[in-house]
């Protein structure tokens, strides 16, 4: 009985720690990436939410923000980068394009939704979403991680 | 020595590719023997999709070409359509267009400056540039209602008027922007590391520039004085005093100086426009919004404009219906990027990021 309590408590502590120290992956695809940079930048400063260390290598990071149109040429690369990330890993799909194809959904070279390639935890709508929306998505993801509701 | 040559892949995911560029580099030790850019990772069929809807509907895709300077893209499109359909535009709308386009040119160059600093290993300019850029975006937010992609220029004018509040905001911004720019320039230009990493790197001779069709700041940094705002004036550019900064070195450092000076000139233009902005309509009343999608056109039209990256224009063919028959995009980044093999050949691998980022490629526009 006491063992169980100890294990759950540790688990909780781990989840809390994971949620509050997400390291995002510098991975810009299209227009939404500019708004992602704004969210990192001086005015919105999303380091306030414990997620400030943007890493350039997938092996260092645990949050992938798919910010832009996913084309058929890029989709296998996204999957590969995702596979290279170490567990625990999370994905935010930013913008209409990454979530469902957006304005380019009728195009012959566009994948309608990055969720066909990698599992997505939080979708953000907008074309492009404002930085506030991305920050809200981050908060939402943190809450889900703490509550243990994420996909992996 | 032949067998010592190794091949290295740069991108498509790399913090210094400014998007999704891939470069195949052949190295002999540290020296680049051959560099081959591979594009197409963001091919979104903008041309085809713009040919699927009425003329103003294409604006959505044109906006998303060069997403850091969306208004400059819209200008090329809207001028081409107006030329095709012989639309009269009220004076106030034309002045508003100049104002918005120049502000957006500054925003685009600021992004370039910030990310170029990042590529050279300096984080501070990024935050300074974004601070300044956010002020411009707040002005855009006030006038157009969005931050990045605006859909603001309509056939026959603009969609909403410039309010007195936004004029106040712009005035406030013009007061100290140039001083702030000085500060940002000093961080890079007075840094020994930055200057020694960029001087004499990624050189393009005037002959290279002409043979690749390189335009914009890159061309002017190589000593060719060509700016469409002066050479074939559109809107009211002939009524405005400004200079075209040129350098003769043709290296990365020269491109940096040209772009910074261009921002100063654009700020000068913005000041003059505020003085000259006439009262009146901001769109042609004959072209009310619901009827825009029913406009028909026949013929061909191409109006070259000076976007922050270079010559931008849209070649339109109308076949008498309300849907364009052909929308061909002349994108400057694509031509500028094609000079990369020449720019890199013979330099060290460490110069690669400096040279690539000095081309300021934006992939929405390269891959279309
Ligand atoms: S959702 Fe809109 S802003 Fe974002 S990448 Fe797609 S087209 Fe660009």
Image: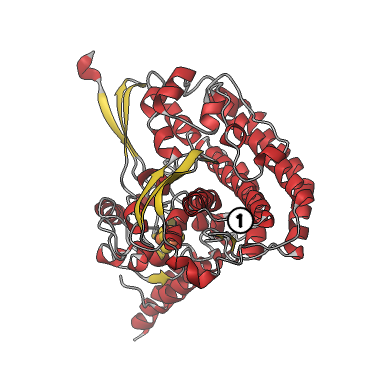
Work out whether B120 lies above or below B140.
above
Q: Which residue is mark 1?
A: B89
Determine the secondary structure under disc 1: loop
**Viewer-closest of B38 and A85:** B38
Along the line of sight, which residue is nearer the eye, A149 or B243? B243
Q: Quadrant of ligand 1?
A: bottom left
Using the rendered image of the protein, determine whether residue B351 is visible from the camera's viewpoint. Answer: yes
Relative depth, front residue between B194 and B131: B131
Is residue B26 positioned above or below A38 on the image?
above
Q: Quadrant of residue A152?
A: bottom left
**Chain to which mark 1 belongs:** B
Expressed as whole percent of the image width and height from the top left, the position of residue B137 reads: 62, 57
Question: Few, some or many C-alpha atoms within 10 Å of disc 1 (few <14, some 14-19, many ≥20)?
Answer: many
- At 45% across and 38% down in the image, what residue appears? B332
Q: Going by the image, does A87 lie left or right of B180?
A: left
B237, above or below A119, in the image: above
Q: Quadrant of residue A104?
A: bottom left
Where is residue B333 shown, x and y percent of the image?
Answer: 44, 39
As drawn, is B325 to the left or to the right of B244? left
Q: Position of residue B277 (x, y in %)?
A: 75, 53
Name the spot of residue B52 as percent of width and height, x first.
33, 61
Residue B253 is at least partly visible in this image: no
* Residue appearing at x 40%, y 63% in the figure: B54
Q: Quadrant of the N terminus of chain B?
A: top left
């Amino acid at each position: 009985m006491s063992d169980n309590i100890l294990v759950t408590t540790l688990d909780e502590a781990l989840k809390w720690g994971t949620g509050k120290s997400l390291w995002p992956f510098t991975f810009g695809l299209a227009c939404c990436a500019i708004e992602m940079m704004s969210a990192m930048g001086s005015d919105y400063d999303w380091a306030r939410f414990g997620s400030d260390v943007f890493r350039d290598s997938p092996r260092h990071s645990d949050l992938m923000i798919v910010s832009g149109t996913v084309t058929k040429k890029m989709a296998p690369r996204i999957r590969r980068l995702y596979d290279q990330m170490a567990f625990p890993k999370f994905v935010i799909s930013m913008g209409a394009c990454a979530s469902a194809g957006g304005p380019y959904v009728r195009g012959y070279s566009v994948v309608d939704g990055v969720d066909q390639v990698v599992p997505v935890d939080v979708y953000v709508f907008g074309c492009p979403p404002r930085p506030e929306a991305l920050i809200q998505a981050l908060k939402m993801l943190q809450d889900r991680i703490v509550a243990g509701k994420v996909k992996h | 020595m032949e067998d010592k040559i190794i091949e290295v892949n740069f991108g498509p995911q790399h913090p210094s590719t400014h998007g999704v560029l891939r470069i195949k580099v052949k190295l002999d030790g540290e020296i680049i023997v051959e560099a081959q850019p591979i594009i197409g990772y963001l091919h979104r069929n903008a041309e085809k999709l713009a040919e699927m809807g009425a003329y103003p509907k294409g604006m959505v895709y044109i906006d998303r070409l060069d997403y850091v300077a969306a208004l400059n893209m819209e200008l090329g499109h809207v001028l081409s359509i107006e030329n095709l359909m012989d639309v009269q535009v009220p004076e106030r709308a034309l002045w508003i267009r100049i104002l918005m386009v120049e502000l957006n040119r500054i925003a685009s160059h600021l992004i370039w400056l910030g990310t170029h600093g990042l590529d050279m290993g300096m984080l501070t300019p990024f935050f300074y540039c974004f601070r300044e850029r956010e002020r411009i975006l707040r002005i855009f937010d006030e006038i157009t209602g969005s931050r990045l992609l605006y859909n603001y220029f309509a056939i026959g004018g603009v969609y909403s008027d410039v309010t007195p509040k936004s004029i106040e905001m712009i005035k406030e911004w013009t007061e100290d922007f140039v001083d702030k720019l000085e500060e940002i320039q000093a961080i890079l230009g007075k840094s020994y590391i930055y200057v020694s990493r960029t001087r004499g790197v990624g050189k393009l001779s005037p002959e290279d520039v002409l043979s690749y069709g390189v335009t914009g700041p890159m061309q002017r940094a190589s000593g060719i004085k060509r700016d469409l705002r002066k050479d074939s004036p559109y809107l009211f550019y002939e009524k405005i005093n400004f200079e075209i900064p040129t350098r003769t070195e043709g290296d990365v450092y020269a491109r940096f100086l040209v772009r910074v000076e261009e921002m100063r000139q654009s700020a000068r233009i913005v000041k003059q426009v505020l003085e000259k902005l006439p009262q009146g309509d901001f769109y042609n009343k004959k072209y009310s919004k619901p009827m825009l999608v029913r406009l028909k056109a026949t013929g061909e039209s191409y109006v070259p404009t000076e976007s922050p990256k270079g010559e931008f224009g849209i070649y339109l063919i109308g076949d008498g219906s309300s849907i364009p028959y052909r929308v061909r995009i002349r994108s400057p980044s694509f031509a500028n990027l094609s000079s990369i093999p020449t720019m890199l050949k013979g330099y060290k691998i460490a110069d690669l990021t400096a040279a690539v980022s000095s081309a300021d490629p934006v992939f929405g526009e390269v891959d279309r």
